[in-house]
Amino acid sequence: MAAVETLTNLQIVAEEYDKTVREDIERFREAAHEFLANNLNDDQFRPHRLRRGIYSQRQAGVQMIRTKVPGGLLTSAQMRQLAQIADDFAGGKGHLTTRQNVQYHFVPLRQVPDVLHALADVRMTTREACYNTVRNVTACPLAGLHPEEPFDVQPYARRLAFAFLHRELTDNLPRKFKVAFSGCPDDCMATAINDVGLRAVIRDGVKGFRMTVAGGLGPLPTEAKLLHEFIPAEDVVAHVEAVIRVFNRHGNRGNKNKARLKFVLRERGFDWLRATIEEEYQDILKNGGIPMPEEVPAGFGGFQPQPPPRGTGELLPLFNTAADYQAWRETNTQPQKQAGYSIVTVKVPQGNLTGDQMRGLADLADRAGDAALRFSMNQNVVLAYVPVGALQRVFGALKTLGLADSGAGEISDVITCPGAYSCNLALTKTMGLGAALAPVLAKETDPVVRRLKINSSGCPNSCGQHWIGDIGFYGNARKIDGREVPYYLMLLGGTQEQFGMAVQSLPARLVPTAVERVLAHFKANRIEGESFRQYVQRHKVETFKKLTADLVKPAELAPELYQDWGDEVAYSLELGRGECAA
């Protein structure tokens, strides 16, 4: 009887959620209609857009739509729907972000409500993917798979994400609020750069989390502070709600540039922040707060109440791929804790997938996996439960999709935001830089260098997380002889908990040369066992300034220096009203 009651309760929750989502989409349709009829001005319409994950682009009349993927996990059916949306509304393309979202570009405003309904058909949403909200809750893509994880964090990530969605408390905060869960030993989700970071631990047989708060990047990066060494996993929603309450009450609503939780920490101090959070937590225990869901509706956060049969891969064609298969297997696969299976990481250049590639990956997850896909923080796709004996067939299938590049997670796997391709605030086309660097770095044979990471953003706002790359870049611009030239500020020695050190700005077209010089110096001068950050600190920033000084303003300016990567026309600095900070 209890099982029947639980199922009935979950069905009720699902029906209420679906009704809320559909009504919300229709409210947006009405607001969009009013805006297009000139009955709402842009300032009045902007909160309607952003609260539903819809950004304006630098191109007039079209929108960027950000789809949330809670915990980075989705079903193969959901991936097929993403592919269909890409084909029907977004020019056949989608972009994976560093927060496990999918973004579509160039969608006409009139078509946006139809996109939102298509997502709701498979229980996906854009709600609160932008604006001053609790953004997409991220989680380790290897959750439930990693041999060394204390426990699977995915159930807690999706339940927390569901708990805070469509809540009055969480959709009009002073500014955005980010939560990350990590279970693997190397903290692949970089919890220290989040407003709340939760790392899985087990104490006395009880599942729980090590909890940090007030981290963040942007123009002024701040490392998170340890709030609790241990909180019970089942109390995670209450503990996070306490932090959100403090942020909601004390965040700076008058200056969006100083509105994140990290500024509350800077201005009031950690002792005050910790004590105030504890007061709110005690109030939640006494008077109640947002409850922890027992479970979420099917499909939300990729949840499958009845996991489908796993694919064997036996029906995939066997290709003769011996030449590059071994290199791919070395860099793109790893053992899964479930015996006989491998984890496969699909390298996605600059995070860009076509509709056909999305569809092909969904088919592959069905035929040789667990009918699920996982998005990583470095913009790749992870397949799980791939039988070890099927790896060569899977590689062949990826080859047909154009997604069989080796080097996943290595230096050639450059992280980029879309940049000035679509963003109002960006100064440079970061994806073009990534595409220019990748073939140069793919030739690297030094195993230590290959393990380094490059992160790049088109502006200081850190969508590409440039502060935490071994080598980081963010876009800026200069005038030379009266003409505008795209530049990147180079940072060196970043880690997930220690930020890169600024060297100097370099012309965009000369960034690959600068990277080659830095790497050559590293190979010639590193000490055995020394990390890249330690090497940078030992040689000091001044060494790298001198190493690249002649690139800052070359004596002879070739015509291409006046062009951004991927462009054939002269660079022009064009900025619209920024909304990623809104």
Image (cartoon, grey):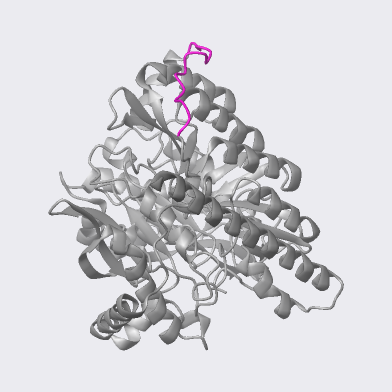
Q: Name which residue lies at 73% across and 68% down.
A: 27
Relative vertical location of residue 189 with respect to residue 243 in this rendering, above or below: above
Classify residue 341 by image quadrant. top left
Of the pair 4 and 364, the residue shown nearer to us: 4
Q: Is residue 462 above or below residue 406?
A: below
Q: Position of residue 231 (x, y in %)?
A: 24, 64
Closer-to-camera residue (112/518) = 112
Q: Is residue 318 among the parts visible in the rendering?
A: yes
Q: Quadrant of residue 265?
A: bottom left
Task: Report the residue at 48% width, 10% height from top.
Answer: 320
Tell me the quarter of the image containing the N terminus.
Answer: top left
Q: Residue at x 51, y 86 (%)?
A: 253
Q: Residue at x 23, y 69 (%)?
A: 226
| Residue 53 coordinates in the image, percent (x, y) | 61, 62
Image coordinates of residue 107 in percent, x first then y, are 74, 54
- Residue 81 position (above or below residue 249): above
Relative side of 1 to 481, left or right: left
Q: Give the magenta part as a residue range.
A: 307-320
Query: Is residue 281 rendered magenta in the image?
Result: no
Q: Considering depth in this image, is 292 or 60 the residue closer to the camera?
A: 292
* Residue positioned most to the front: 1
Q: Within the magenta stretch, is there residue 313?
A: yes
Residue 502, percent from left and from top: 37, 66
